[in-house]
Image: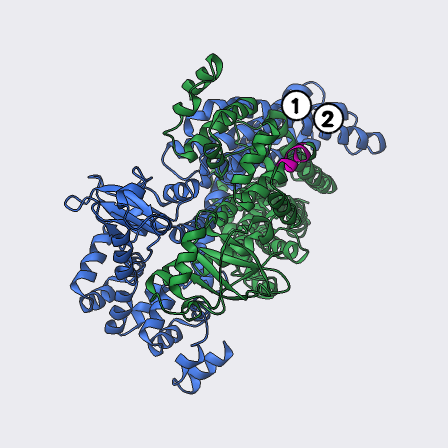
Chain colours: A green, B blue
Amino acid sequence: MERIRLRLEDSVVGIGEAVAELPAADLADLVNELTLHEAATVTTLLPVPRAIEVFDQPTLRRRGAIMEELDPGRAAQILEGLSADERTDIVRQMQDHARRRCMPKMSPAGQAEVERLLRYPPRTAGAIMTTEFVRLDPTMKVGEALRHIRSVAREKESIYACYVMEPDTGKLLGAVSLRNLVMAELEQPVTEVMTRKPVTVNALDDQEGVAAKIAKYNLLAIPVIEQDGGVVGFVTVDDVIDVMIQEGTEDALKMGAVEPGALDEPYIATPFWSLIRKRAGWLIILFLSEMLTATAMGRFEDEISRAVVLALFVPLIISSGGNSGSQAASLIIRALAVGELTIRDWWRVMRREVLAGLVLGSILGFVGFLRITLWSLVSPLYGPHWPLVAITIWLSLIGVVLWGTLSGSLLPIVLKRAGLDPAVSSAPFVATLVDVTGIIIYFSVAAVIMRGTLL
Amino acid sequence: MERIRLRLEDSVVGIGEAVAELPAADLADLVNELTLHEAATVTTLLPVPRAIEVFDQPTLRRRGAIMEELDPGRAAQILEGLSADERTDIVRQMQDHARRRCMPKMSPAGQAEVERLLRYPPRTAGAIMTTEFVRLDPTMKVGEALRHIRSVAREKESIYACYVMEPDTGKLLGAVSLRNLVMAELEQPVTEVMTRKPVTVNALDDQEGVAAKIAKYNLLAIPVIEQDGGVVGFVTVDDVIDVMIQEGTEDALKMGAVEPGALDEPYIATPFWSLIRKRAGWLIILFLSEMLTATAMGRFEDEISRAVVLALFVPLIISSGGNSGSQAASLIIRALAVGELTIRDWWRVMRREVLAGLVLGSILGFVGFLRITLWSLVSPLYGPHWPLVAITIWLSLIGVVLWGTLSGSLLPIVLKRAGLDPAVSSAPFVATLVDVTGIIIYFSVAAVIMRGTLL
């Protein structure tokens, strides 16, 4: 690292050799540590095939931005060398003006390909697929197929999954793995060794669904088909791993009420004010909603001034509602994400969570009851009416925890039903929702139990 | 589904045919919906090769439990047919007595293999690796290598990554993909087409690290080596996808303060009391810690009784600390998980988060200040001293949010340093930690600002 930076300062000769031994993934790590300008300089100094290798790394960040800094001719050369999916991904990240300067330097075929792929919305199968797969003819024998694969292997991103297609219509007849071809007799027709109804995805399917299918059926690649049944590309298992890491990051951030884009760059490299922007928005929204707690508390100001002891337990009561809500939410969000639950199960979820809320609330309530009872035997803190306080706490906790588990479990389902991401119903949101109601439940229970004594 | 169940009730003949058309992954889904006893009956009725296919599905649940219900001889047959990693995984899940009945029915080689693999601790590379890989000899030519692969392909889990090993010592000389072999000349020596220093993992490496390496270097498989440098197996990309899904579930649950095992079975299928146990433990621990808020509030009982208005803002203040803490925690947990941060970065994280806390706290404080000011122009709710209340809120929020971001960002680093999983420092835990301190900060600020007027 230090050596590279020194070389950049001293002289630009010899960078290629200095990093010649590094695996491309490690070189990408190194480029990630450089400024945008330095990164572009290093890229320019690398031999083109080496630069292509580096841009092929999913871990390389700012791929679009570095590309914009390069000479358009060189950028076009690197783009041409990449597989169609990576190329489109990078062009997608480039600003319009840089795109317009660089695209015309590419081959007409390459340009047309990029333009076609750009039409698929981001995060769909079409947007992450690659178009370079091995097409086999149904009339081929295994020996011919292997010879064909051998001759085209250099251009194709993956040769492990090959697709047998009707020559005229492009309709998918079957899939055959290189493994099965290698194991078969050379004289067998490929139609005999292929799988006839391979699992496929639609070009407009969400990338998470694609990942789920590849994981479920243990595939190395999955063909992507258009509405007309024609194959337009396929998604490989390593694209899917990248998708899973990306979605994992977004879910983790959503659960903490941070804008999902906050870790597009590494935490340390993200500019300070951009980090603040990604956090302040949700924090303010949560703060404004939480202000309702002050309003709710305000309605019980009289009760508080008559029995200050009630105020002491407010944080305990509302946090219990929030915690039980977060638990329920994270269970349901995850079960929805891995496909173990669907929105049609809402009734079964509700039944379970009503029971769970009652049981958990009773347990916490009992712990609270015990604590106040034991404390009151040695200290006058809770006053002479401590048994009423203890009973109020117990009953309120049942109500608040029940409400927490119900909101926490049903909110993700409601969000999913509305077409939103359930992961947004994260701990902070559930807690905020439960806090206001928790206060109302608590003081209402207190009003009933303590009428005529403390209140 | 209904048809299967009917057949199970009516007669047991014909189940094999009824499900003969289903892909194994879908058949596994179906078995997941059955009771343990039904699942065992279906497994017994399937032809052995088909049963092996079903048990090979990562989505099949209760694999150990179903195996225990089977006749030991049949269980051994199915186990023999599975790859070594799956086999060991299932045996690991079986109770001791069932293991002892079933293992002796396996071939001595199979038994020895399982016993060797069981010695690797769960969640390490050794525990998820498979031992059936293609070994090539450094003296082989490409043509010979391809013929060798062809002859052993049926027994090996994957033939896409082959390893060239020193015949005597078993030391790894290089890795070569089937793709490179197919593309090379038949007369070339394999040592010419192999990669000399392939990326490897140690048998005792954590499975998450293995997943990260496969993702980073875009590998289909990674060799697992022992301390002595010998290859003992390899981990394939589909094992890694299963690991990622499993770890994703655990992290999501930990972030909601649920025991990670809570979704080992689907949410709906988990027995009610087992679900309660997985939730009650943490809920009680959080509740007991949160009781400190009542103690903290108790110390300010006098202040509250003199200025009830102070109590109204307690939920708002402490939840703001909790929310900013959750945000910081989820950012840092994720950055640690994907390797963008290491514990050595704590100082840079702290510097950033102190600044972020001050800025975010000032913003929220200003919003709070505005709200109280505007409200007081039209309502007497906050009394004649409302400007003091507004300033108290502003200053407390700066302190509480600063404390929240600091705790939220440093707690995951501290946990990681202590060898624990950072994901445990989830929203509920950070919130609980911040609540007590939030109360103390708030009332201390109030005591200073309001001394001589309200207090």
At x 48%, y 52%, the residue is: A236
Question: Quick check: B8 above or below B194?
Answer: below
Tell which of B291 and B151 is nearer to you: B151
**Which chain letter matches label 2?**
B
Q: Residue furthest top?
A: A10
> Is residue A259 visible to the viewer in this orientation of the structure?
no
Q: Residue furthest left?
A: B168
- Kindly identify the amino acid type of the residue bearing the numbered disc 2: Ala
- The quarter of the picture where the C terminus of chain B appears is top right
Image coords of residue B58 (percent x, y): 40, 60
Dot 2 or dot 1: first in sequence order is 2
**Secondary-structure class at tag 2:** helix
Question: Quick check: B407 above or below B32?
Answer: above
Quarter occupied by residue B101: bottom left
- Kindly identify the amino acid type of the residue bearing the numbered disc 1: Leu
Crowd around label 1: few <14 · some 14–19 · many ≥20 (10 Å)? many
Residue B373 in the figure: left or right of residue B306: right
Question: Quick check: A248 above or below A17?
Answer: below
Look at the image and say whether residue A100 sits in the magenta stretch.
Answer: yes
Residue that label 1 marks: B395
Magenta-tinted stretch: A98-105
Crowd around label 2: few <14 · some 14–19 · many ≥20 (10 Å)? many
Residue that label 2 marks: B390
